Amino acid sequence: MVIAEIIIVAVVALIVLLTVVRSVRIIPQARARNVERFGRYRKTLEPGLNFILPFIDRVKPQIDLREQVVSFNGQSVITEDNLVVQIDTVLFFQVTDPRAADYEIVDYIGAIEQITATMLRSVIGSMDLEQTLTSRDKINALLRGVLDDASGKWGIRVTRVEIKAIDPPKSVKDAMEKQMRAEREKRAAILTAEGQRQSQILTAEGDKTSKILRAEGDKQAAILRAEGEAEAIGQVFGSIHRNDPDPKLLAYQYLQTLPQLAAGAGNTFWVIPSEVTTALKAVTSAFGGGDAPASGTPVPGTPAAGAGAPGAAPPDAAEQAPSPAIPRQPGLPEIAAPHGQLTAPSAPDAEDPVREVPASITPPGSLNGSAPTSGEDG
């Protein structure tokens, strides 16, 4: 009897322990479990310590309430321009209603995958390849809106949808690579041309600036040189007037400038000004030691006019004929004798402005071989 009582007590204790164990459920944080009583939904167990009726309530598998990530690989989608592309998507979702997620749909992850593929075909089917490759944000926004609306009744909230990869056919990839290579070469050529153009512009601007500065420098140098020459001429002019130079000195300086007229290497013809005779007169007077003898007085050492030279033939009737009268230039030496005898210049006579000189002899100071008139006197 004792043994039987012990066995009965042990069995009762085991049943009580098992009942207690089966009636207590501990749910982790961000988890949930649905409870069915006689096959009907009764309640959802919250995180923490929960009690149920053992052998009557049945607890369903645990549901994760955290945000989950699921990746869908290799979904074939046809674009508007009839190109087949492979699209990989990443979906972020969260269970907000454990009861709906458990009783409204059998496999909510599979349902989300299928609706994502369907919406991708619908969205990308209205775009060409270029828009598909460059409109990822637009595709993500459209997919998220559609999936959120469709999965709302399942107790699921879609937080984000991302296009992970878009793989066009290999031929299209090769064409795109060639196009991108051509675009890069085009941009490189444009940048090179722009650089050369900018370099030439800067070089031209530098040359322009340097020429302007050089011209301004030459201008300032010419101005300063002219000012210096003007100042030097003014000083020379003032010095000459302060020292009151003799006209004879000025005539000598004038004669010294004559060789400079013929100093050029290519000069084959040069003209002697008429003022040379005046300068010669002044120099002759300067080196003569005084005033020249009067007109008609023979120069010492020369035979007198009318006297026959030794060995000369007597003058004939043609030589005794009077010569035509030629006006005498003031300040020029007189031609007194037909036989080449020169007389010293004399002071001009107001009462006798015209002397009779043989026409065959050209006065000094004439340029063309004829005697100048009084109006051509230099």
Image (cartoon, rainbow, N blue to C red):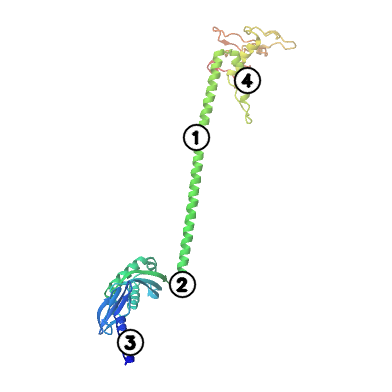
Which of the image's four quarters has the N terminus? Answer: bottom left
Query: Within 10 Å of the Cα at label 3, are there few (<14), some (14-19), or many (20+) other Cα atoms?
Result: few
Identify the residue shown where x is 52% and y is 30%: 222
According to the image, label 1 marks what residue?
216
Q: CA distance from mark 4 to mark 2?
A: 99 Å
Please name the amino acid that badge 3 sits on: Ala
- SS class of the residue under badge 1? helix
Which mark sits nearer the N-terminus, 2 or 3?
Answer: 3
Residue found farthest to the right? 311
According to the image, label 2 marks what residue?
171
Identify the residue shown where x is 60% and y is 14%: 249
Please name the amino acid that badge 1 sits on: Glu
298 above or below 233?
Answer: above
Which mark sits nearer the N-terminus, 3 or 1?
Answer: 3
Which mark sits nearer the N-terminus, 4 or 2?
Answer: 2
Query: Within 10 Å of the Cα at label 1, are there few (<14), some (14-19), or many (20+) other Cα atoms?
Result: few
- SS class of the residue under badge 2? helix
